[in-house]
Image (spheres, helix red, strand yellow):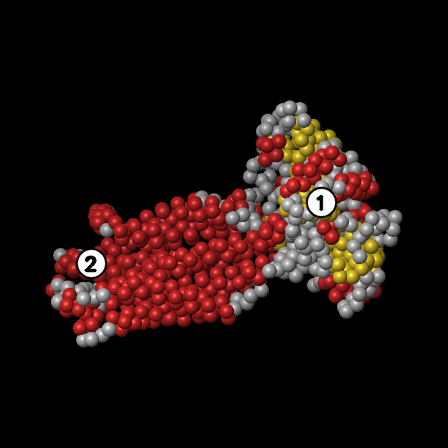
Amino acid sequence: MGNFLQTLQYSLRMLRKNPGFTAVAVLTLALGIGANSAIFSVVNGVLLRRMPYSDPDRLNIIWNDYGSQGQSLPAVSPPDFQDYRQRSRLMDFASARPTPGGTLVFTDANGSSRPEHFDMAYVTTNFFPLFGAQPILGRNFTPEEGDLHGPNVVILSYLLWQRGFHADPNVVGTSIQLNGEPFTVVGVLPQKFRLLLPAEVFRLRDSQLWIPQQLNYSAFPRNFTILSVFSRLKPGVTLAQAQAEMDGIADQLSNENEVHKESGLRIRVVPLQFDVVKNVRSTLVTLLGAVAFVLLIACGNVANLLLARATGREREMAIRTALGASRAQLIIQVLMESLLLAILGGLAGVLLASWGLDLLLALHPAGLPRLTDIHIDRTVLAFSLGLSILTALLFGLVPALQGTQLNLSDTLKETGRTTGAARTQAARRMFVIAEFALSLVLLIGTGLLIRSFIALQRVQPGFDTRNVVTFRLMIPQTRYPKNEDVQRFDHELEQKLAALPGVESVGSVSQLPLTGSGSLTPYAYDAATEQKWESLSADWCVVSPGYLPSVGARLLAGRFFNDSDDSNHPRVIIIDQTLAERAWPGQNPVGKKLKIETFDPPGTPGWALVVGLVANLHIHDLARADREQIYVPYAQRPWSNFAVALKARGDPASVLAQAREQVRALDPLVAVRSLQPMEQYVSDARAPMQFNLILIGIFGAIALVLASIGLYGVMTYAVSQRSHELGIRLALGAAPRDILGLILGQGVRLTLIGAGAGLLVSLALTRSLASLLYGVSATDPLTFALVPVVLAAVALLACYIPARRAMRVDPMIALRYE
């Protein structure tokens, strides 16, 4: 312990003695460790941290697949769900069903009413026990409350209890008006509970209002998939056993039900945590690899600093050896200094990570789940500590070994240059080559993402966002019980909005583009596909006559909907190019008939006449081709939870307040929500790639700067070591430009070797970026050609200052050096 403390004190004294060296080394390490800690915080919060449920490893979500071209979604029909519960012996099941939402009316201090809309979900009475959630106030639902026509009860989220009910401890038992109906509050959920869902779950959300599901399950058709189903493995049951059981149940249901037999039903049991994060896993792993490269480059830079410092300390080490110190003690001394530098760099890095994390979350990374779980906690701090220790070994071991490999007699007799200069210079060159190789990998990744982002910016979504503003409405069923009532409300609202000054057109849609997964419908276009019902499926949405013209959809054949397309006339639809090419390739689809799912009663197939063909619209994702699209007229299928798209002749901001007032005038209890320009949805769709580009671009820039500093240091040191040689060259008649070329040539050689190694590594690693790219190959020749040129230009700049200094060497001073 005494030796340890003595070594520690000496190390601290040496670092204080060289404040410039210490500051540069600590800052360099802080950049590397801070970047890694920040990204690891995201990886830890999103991928590694267990979900906030009881035994989350046993929780699953159920997917139903219907053939290679049919529906594949975490969606189950009510009768199938009942069969799962009755036939499974290895799992417990619960389900949730989305709703149009709930409107609560709050009274302001001045007595005026203020409607607010909240997400709401219907759940089976065992839903919260399945997730291990116990209300902090009140109780869970009872089995009787899930009976058909059971009591109106509701459980509140913690956030709604805090914000809407001012954390009233006596809220349980009170009656609230929800969508115009009285509901009794029976519980308040804990603060940490939130429903985490994969992106493919459509319409269901983590809600503020939870109501028991009261369904006549057997009344629904087998192909009406409206439930999100969750399961919990019973103790001792493995996922493989559960999947085998569900395979058997799928076979039973296929044998018993013609619709499943023809569709090729497959039931998949998918771990919930895996499903929630599957779309971002590769992105986060790629980012973690990128920051690891930054850390390695930072370690190379600090190792270069230590090697340069070790050359100047050879005499000190020789004297300590002569006084009895062993080589092991000298190595421990150098490693102790490295460890202190790493710990100081780690502390500064954690501070940078906290700032960087705030900046990262401020970018609003769309599609990144579990954002509230991302923070610096004990796991991240332990990671940073371990990383600091590992870093100390990475950048300290080679200088420690090189700096203590002494020729004692020569070193003590030396009066000028140190004996290990050539040896340490070779090691420093190797570090610079490695730094440039790693930098090239990051820069090529950045280049590929830049080209992808440019390609994505050029993608035309198929609709025109200019001067279009949107908002959502939910029409309470209690006040608008019939489809005719809902359709009348929408029609009157559109007429009022269209009459506003500055409004060009208005339309309504059941779901706006680029707002998540939507509803699917099976379809058939001939006898073969009709016989295999459910083998094909398409996205569908309900639109009013003004919607497609308002968003600039391009009509290719036929017509848009008009006011005569109502429930008193034959069923009609509009389809897109993708569906037309699949069903009737090379033909005009207008006038042909398509069999789709209808709602009279729900799930019943029926034939509809195609009256229009529109160009493809990007409904879900700008970067991928969408599924076939079917548009249904609003008057033939009124939708109580819909969005309004309003196209203005100029700046739509001028009509926003008027639009809100028109809704309030029509019904003061209908809340307007999600009021925003339509271009915001397009911007959000591009946000994930922009997020990746910004982060990897930052890491690439840091790597390039660090590598350039490393090359500058090596070249500066080389000039100082070769001053005698350069003086002789100049004395023998060498021109200054010859010296410039000599030094630049040395730097260029290092750069070319590093670039060559980096290109080979990039060819192997950039394939992992393929899932993040759009419109460009992972081995894009242009990127692989341009990035090394940029790297070489920066390297030349880093070499130029030392080379200029070499040109100014005074031959007389250099010759008197010895």
Instruction: From the viewer's side, name the closer residue of 322 and 346.
Output: 346
Residue occupying image coordinates x 62% and y 57%: 622
Residue 790, picture quadrant: bottom left
Left or right: where 202 falls relative to 405: right
Q: Nearer the viewer, residue 137 or 707?
A: 707
Identify the residue at the far left of this view.
413
Q: Secondary structure at mark 1?
A: strand
**Which class describes the residues within 10 Å of circle 1: few (<14), some (14-19), or many (20+)?**
many
Q: Which residue is mark 2?
A: 313
Q: Could you tell me which residue is drawn at 34 percent across and 54 percent down?
A: 28
Name the residue: 27% across, 71% down. Answer: 737
Residue 466 spot, x, y in % from top left: 65, 51
Residue 352 in the image, given as x and y percentages of width and height:
40, 47
- Look at label 1 and name its amino acid: Val
Position of residue 140 relative to residue 767, above or below, is above
Where disc 2 sits, the SS reads: loop
Mark sitting on residue 503: 1
* Label 2 crowd bin: few (<14), some (14–19), many (20+), radius 10 Å: some
Label 2 to label 1, Cα distance in Å? Answer: 79 Å
Q: Which mark is residue 197?
A: none
Q: Residue at x 59, y 49 (%)?
A: 58
